[in-house]
Amino acid sequence: MNTTHDGSIPADFPQHDNADDARRLNTDNAPISPGEIAVGVVIGRASEYFDFFVYAIASVLVFPSLFFPFEGRLEGTLYAFVIFSFAFIARPIGTVLSMAIQRRFGREAKLTIALFLLGSTTAGIAFLPPYSDLGANAIIILSLLRIGQGLALGGSWDGLPSLLALNAPQDKRGWYAMLGQLGAPVGFFIAAGLFWFLISTLDNLDFMDWGWRYPFYVAFAINVVALFARLRLISTNEYSRLLEERELQPTSVVEMASSQGRNLIIGALAALASYALFHLVTVFPLSWINLYSPRSVAGFLLTEMGGVFLMAGGVVASGIIADRIGRRRTLGTLATLIALFSAFVPMLLNGGDAGQDAFILIGFTLLGLSYGQAAGAVTANFPAKYRYTGAALTSDLAWLVGAGFAPLVALGVSAKFGLAYVGLYLLSGAVCSLAALSLNRALDIKN
């Protein structure tokens, strides 16, 4: 809750009785350490990424045949990837709507609505009948549920990553910035592990009938746990005081876009190489193996799970590196390495099991090193007044431009023109990142 210099509450920022009641229920008002904030960030992001990857894996292994049986395997997968992209289109809309909810009803209400929507839409997919039962209505409902996931992800922004970066020690901000990014490998490992177990233990008929639905049920339970873990933190008076001190409050999107449009664009493009690589080593290769390789899907999921450990190690290492040489130089170096890696995409994916394993292991390592500081690139650009909303929208735009259509584009161009064009797609993301970083002087300052 914002206050004026004399301690009064501005008329345009009303008190929220429900938020005050929630904070009074939490008796632990001791100072919040960066470590506590980091735990809240990791738990929250891990639950969101789990939902994200459960849907992504099902888009490759399940949805083409269940919802697009009238098309071939390639076309069905491409259609599934079209629906996959809907969440990234809806995400910034969800952010804008959620900021309005927060201004009117408070942070706790906004987060509760967002995580309940995320859990219910994800779990709702588990109950969705296939095309053979509902016809085109099944595709429409799947699309609506996917849009709901995107709106929920936009609304789940709690400001914790920005607060973490601002309250971390001056010489450890790269380290603390990477902690929240650990949610990605944790979420992917659990999601891939569940699908690996189900594929390995069930016959194909049972898996396609009911087995694939189980991870979507699990997602709702995980979101409930994450909701209470995050509410326990954000409902404290100390959390509110830290937000007020750092001016981390929602601002008008129109005002922010007119004042900070340049920072929005540069911030979104600065980490584009990382976001483009994100789906090119997680979702796309799984679809390519499923369609064009005799290799076992379960075995390939195990390889990706091994790559996740390298990704997690890369995320941790990125914090140490960024604190030594700065975030801008770290992201620039990694964008250059990703550009070099793009040249080897065709050779590795066409190189049999050994080449494909190398693609996954190298790709996940580069992803961890670059993605570990992607949040820092977002936070550092904005003045305090715009940081809360700006960080959320910049992240939304980076996901939309860099990752939202990556599986669709990569599979489409590789099927039509060959894998070399996947490398060109990745190279374009790296070039955009390098161009944005050359303008993004805010990252020269370790804030």
Image: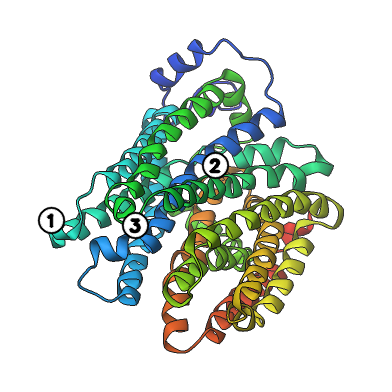
Give the amino acid type for the residue marked by disc 1 in the picture: Leu
Q: Quadrant of residue 266?
A: bottom right
> Do the residues bearing badges 2 and 3 touch, measured as CB atoms within 8 Å?
no
Residue 254 occupies quadrant: bottom left
Name the residue beneath numbered marker 1: 134
How far, Cα to Cα, is label 1 from label 3?
A: 22 Å
The first of marks 1 and 2 along the sequence is 2
Q: Residue at x 80, y 42 (%)?
A: 172
- Identify residue for label 3: 204
Can you say whether 3 is above or below 56 in the image? above
Indicate the secondary structure of the residue bearing disc 3: helix
Numbered disc in front, either 1 or 2: 1
**Quadrant of the rendered structure where residue 74 is?**
bottom left
Q: Which of the two labelled residues, at mark 1 and mark 3, occupies the earlier sequence position?
A: 1
Amino acid type at image mark 3:
Asn
Q: Secondary structure at mark 2?
A: helix
Nearer-the-camera pick, 21 or 2: 21
How many residues crowd mark 3 within 10 Å: few (<14), some (14–19), many (20+)? Answer: few
Picture residue at 50% right of the left edge, 16% below the top: 23
Q: CA distance from mark 1 to mark 2?
A: 33 Å
- Mark 2, residue position: 46
